[in-house]
Amino acid sequence: MDTRPIGFLDSGVGGLTVVRELMRQLPHEKIIYIGDSARAPYGPRPAEQIREYTWEMVNFLVTKDVKMIVFACNTATAVAWEEVKEALDIPVLGVILPGSSAAIKSTTKGKVGVIGTSMTVASDIYRQKIQLLAPSVDVISLACPKFAPIVESNETASSVAKKVVYETLAPLVGKVDTLVLGCTHYPLLRPIIQNVMGSSVKLIDSGVECVRDISVLLNYFEINGSRSPDNEIIQHHFYTTANPKIFQEIASAWLKQEINVEHVTL
């Protein structure tokens, strides 16, 4: 029975939005999480640097003997997912394709917005994936470089966060019926984003959609005993390259449970 953990990587705390959904859908799975908050955000960085940092996190997770790696980071997925997927002999999942597919299913008017980091938006990967599957859908992409730093500094409920979100999203208001949260940090700002965009706009959490793919994959391999046994005490491990205390505060509040966080240098 394969009781090895699932590995998650992100530029910081954003990937916890994916972890929370995995804990809800697949509570018997063990988690190893690495967040590179010391070098976040990844969005403004050159692609080669993002690739280098992503490989460092991948190699860290491989040393923990994970059975699967989840890119809980849209920027890393856009830059390095294909390369890493081809290089490893364990499943490697990203968040962009699941989010794109969900947006296509959601839109009623064929008007989809995508918000993400500067690198994710510059890569044009969401528009490409969406229009590959549904050529008639119009996609408007918008970089939101200030969102992730707000989340990383644990200021999601501040007046500054509300002001930044309102000003940044203004070009999209009234123009889309579906909005892809193309960065796993953004669901932590979801109430503000929803308020700005309006209640009629469907928000797509690419991380939540990714967990559905994880579940399908584990079900596919269930004949080989990929699920952890019901009677096992589940122990998760979280690592950050920055201040463990700040990470722990954000993670404990978001996951609604106390967790232990260790500092690691990549």
Image (cartoon, grey):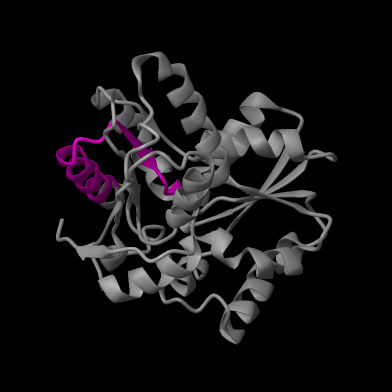
Q: Is residue 45 left or right of residue 118?
A: left
Instruction: Write down the quadrant of residue 102 in the picture.
Output: top right
Q: Quadrant of the C terminus?
A: bottom left
Q: Residue furthest front?
A: 231
Q: Give the residue at x 26% y 34%.
A: 4
Q: Residue 234, can we see it? A: yes
Q: Is residue 229 left or right of residue 14?
A: left
Q: Quadrant of the N terminus?
A: top left
Q: Give the residue at x 28% y 45%.
A: 51
Front-most of 164 and 211?
211
Front-most of 241 and 47?
241
Q: Residue 175 at x, y = what percent?
A: 80, 55
Highlighted range, magenta: 51-74
The question of residue 65 being in magenta is answered with yes
Q: Is residue 168 above or below residue 118?
A: below
Q: Is residue 224 left or right of residue 215?
A: left
Q: Is residue 193 above or below residue 229?
A: below
Q: Is residue 231 above or below residue 163?
A: above
Q: Residue 228 at x, y = what percent?
A: 35, 32
Q: Give the residue at x 44% y 50%.
A: 19
Q: Residue furthest bottom?
A: 159
Instruction: Write down the quadrant of residue 157 in the picture.
Output: bottom right
Q: Residue 122, can we see it? A: no
Q: Is residue 64 left or right of residue 140?
A: left
Q: Residue 169 at x, y = what percent?
A: 68, 66
Q: Residue 42 at x, y = what percent?
A: 36, 58
Front-most of 48 and 193?
193
- Circle count: 0
